[in-house]
Amino acid sequence: MANTDFFEMVYAVVRLIPRGRVTSYGAIANYLGTKSSARVVGYAMNAAGKVKPKVPAHRVVNRNGMLTGKLHFEHPHQMQELLEKENIEVKNDQVMNFEKLFWDPTSELEM
DNA sequence: GTAATGACCTTGG
DNA sequence: ACCAAGGCCATTA
């Protein structure tokens, strides 16, 4: 039953995120054409851990580069750990050099 | 079917 | 500059 194609779209983009790179909900929503539905993107991440294959939701942060969804992970500290493993510096639940590591699908994919 | 919530973003005071 | 409120889309109760 075609589970919300919107979700799969989000998953596809998130899975395309290069290693050591991060993106924001609004960026994905914007790429999908529904920048107003940034909340829905976040909601999609809610089921990310239930979808197959699993989606690297740890590479998705809010516009401020803050790990807002880390609390929603199976293990809150896991998100920061994964990000650090990707060579990404995380301090105070915030991604350092966020603008530098920011990966915008609209610019990388859609161009 | 209506109401409330949410891993957000934008705009107004 | 900082604080507050609204809007959008989908899911769940």
Image: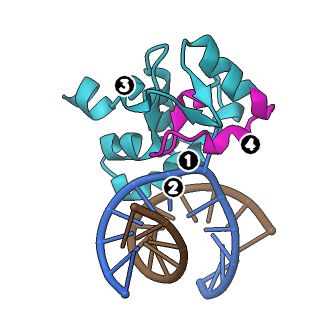
Chain colours: A cyan, B blue, C brown
Chain at tag 4: A
- From the top left corner, tell me how far across and down residue A3 is, in percent: 57, 43
Give the spatial CA distance, label 4 vs label 2: 16 Å
Badge nearest the viewer, 4 or 2: 4
Is residue A67 highlighted in magenta?
yes
Q: Which quarter shows the N terminus of chain A?
A: top right
Q: Residues within 10 Å of mark 3 (few under 14, many from 20)?
A: few
Image-based side of C6 in relation to A68, left or right:
left
Residue visible at 68% across and 28% down in the picture: A79
Q: Secondary structure at mark 4?
A: helix
Tell me the CA gap for discs 4 and 1.
13 Å
Question: Which chain's residue wears label 1?
Answer: A
Q: Quadrant of residue A46?
A: top right
Residues at discs 1 and 2 in contact (Cβ within 8 Å): yes
Q: Quadrant of residue A93?
A: top right
Residue A42 has which mark? Answer: 1
Which percent across, then down, holds residue A70? 69, 38
Is residue A93 visible from the viewing direction of this image?
Answer: yes
Residue at the spot x=71%, y=34% of the render?
A: A50
> Which disc number belongs to residue A71?
4
- Are the residues flagged by discs 2 and 3 from a single subunit? yes
Tell me whether the residue at label 4 lies in contact with that at label 2, contact meaning CB atoms closer than 8 angstroms: no
Name the residue rendered at 35%, 53% in the picture: A35
Q: Would you name the residue on which mark 2 appears?
A: A39
- The stretch of residues the image draws in magenta is A57-77
Residues at marks 1 and 2, CA–CA distance in whole angstroms: 5 Å
Which is nearer the N-term, disc 4 or disc 3? 4
Residue A111 spot, x, y in % from top left: 18, 28
Q: Which residue corresponds to mark 3?
A: A100
Using the image, determine if residue A99 lies above or below residue A15. Answer: below
